[in-house]
Amino acid sequence: MVWKRTAALKMFVAVSTVQRALCLLLACCIARIGPAIGAEPVGPGRTFYVDVNSLGGSCDDSNPGTASRPWRTALKAFSTAGPGDTVVFRRGIYRVTRSLHTSDLKLDPSQAAPIVFKAPAGEQAVITNLRPIPAADWKQVATTKSGKPIFGAPASGGARVTNLTQHGVPLRRAFCGNTRSWYEDTPPEAIDGPGEWASSLREHRVYLCPTNGEPPGDSIELCDVRGPGASGNLISLERDKEDRCRNLRLVFENLTFETGFHGLVIRTGFVELRQCVLRKSFGDLLNTLSGRVIVDGCDFYAFGESAIDVTTPGNGPKPAGMPPMAIRNSRFHDNVQVRSPRQKGTNGVMLKGGCADIVVEGNQFYNLRATYGALTLGGATSGGQSGEGFRLTARNNIFHDIAGPYVVLFSGSHDCRLVNNLICSSDVANLILIICAKSSDPATANLRPQVQNNIFYRNTVKRAVVSTPRGAASGLVMDHNLIAGSGNICLLDDVEVPLKDLPQRGYQSHGVDQPPLFRDFARLDFHPTKGSPDTDRGADLRTLVPCDADGTPRPQGQAFDIGPFEMR
């Protein structure tokens, strides 16, 4: 009997051991395979999916956000993902009906890992607060003084219309002289001609004189948001009283943003934009007060004010571990005029308000019709102040086909530099303008501006460099620039000086006045060719400009080259 009990016990132990081994094996297999298909991602570093077209599976915001059971809206993604998570937007148009705010985010001040929002390579995911107006909604309601038809369509009740586009291009808003009524109640009679629009908050309607004089059809989109997001901004990262979002990190990659007023408004946190497209704004595409932004490989166009407007108060130290703001390898082009000439103008990139240590490098500025210019180093915050910009550096950029009063402006800047750039084929009054931030106030003058190693070629321009009034530029360094084709006069301290006389005043002692030789100027290939006079003629700025626009270390020859590219 004892033997039988012992045998039974041994058999039980053996069976239990086998069961435990099988369970362990099954657990390892499950861990290797991952969570069941359709299960909600768990743990840090989760990946969620948004798929408005149900490409991978039927979309719904009640889904767990997996590839096969994705979410439908951008708001769901913005309000669910946390630090360390990645949200993948599949191909499609994601329309939002209000601004996406900081308060929508899942905040964890103790976590420094970024939240990443991205689209797969080869897929275009568009996040927009513009909506189409059905063709049937348009009815002719009036005519302009010249007899062009004006059409009207309903807008959302209680909503302020902040942008109207036709075929993807923002149109000009009619102006009736009163700021409040201009934004809220402008009658159709204020419209002068094709390409203009107006709206009435009281009547809940929008009015348009189409660009071609024909009924608008389905070519029109508008932004008529209301409620907390009635500003028309697409994404607004605002500070709260405790600034709990100071350590917030957001990364946007390969996404397209369209907006009613401003695109991204950043007042807190740290934001990276990688290979994104920003377009169709009535205001700025990117507006930041924080200066904690990296822009890399992006495309900015169809903007009504600035592509990027940076107003960063203070010149104090930045939080430990935070890299300086950089705008690099991006394109700024084809802006639009959406305002009356009496209102705000347009810029490419504006850096002002005491911003510091920002690098603008390797970018292309082209086809800009600016009320001001393509790039502003400093500005006129609240009428102008001392120290509008500190140690701002523009290097290895290409500016071509710019129209306006100037290409680059120094205004109230301290130790700002324009080095190794190319400005060509532009029709402006001045290539470089150096002025006080506040008119004729020497306390807002520029200190130690640096203009070196640049190529100014084939521009339609009266003057190359203008510093006015007297004393607007203290300690100006201007040398080793190639100036050819036009702009052979400078205005320095209100005195016109021909290029040949600049060395007598301490400038351009090593300047070059021979035309550069490019690989293919007509096709916008601005790499130098053998024998170009800009080769080995630049100042040695390797600590300031260690590489050229291609990333090639400088110098490649016996000395530094002038312009954005080294001869190789």
Image: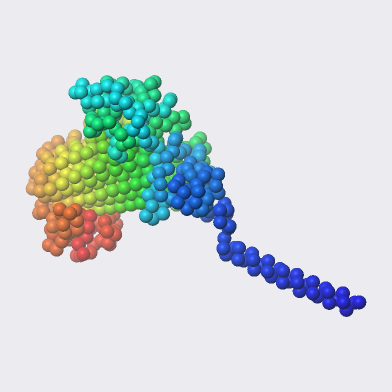
Q: Position of residue 299 (x, y in %)?
A: 31, 47
Q: Residue at x 55, y 47 (%)?
A: 63
- Quadrant holding the N terminus: bottom right
Q: What's the image's color scheme?
A: rainbow
In this image, 498 relative to 341: left or right? left
In this image, 116 relative to 474: left or right? right
Q: Position of residue 429 (x, y in %)?
A: 15, 38
In the image, is residue 560 above or below residue 422? below
Q: Residue at x 19, y 53 (%)?
A: 524
Question: Which residue is at the front of the view, 103 or 566?
Answer: 103
User: Can residue 533 be seen here?
Assistant: yes
Quadrant of residue 185 within the rendered picture: top left
Q: Residue at x 64, y 66 (%)?
A: 26
In the image, is residue 291 above or below residue 555? above
- Quadrant holding the C terminus: bottom left
Quadrant of residue 182 within the rendered picture: top left
Q: Position of residue 502 (x, y in %)?
A: 11, 46
Q: Residue at x 58, y 57 (%)?
A: 36
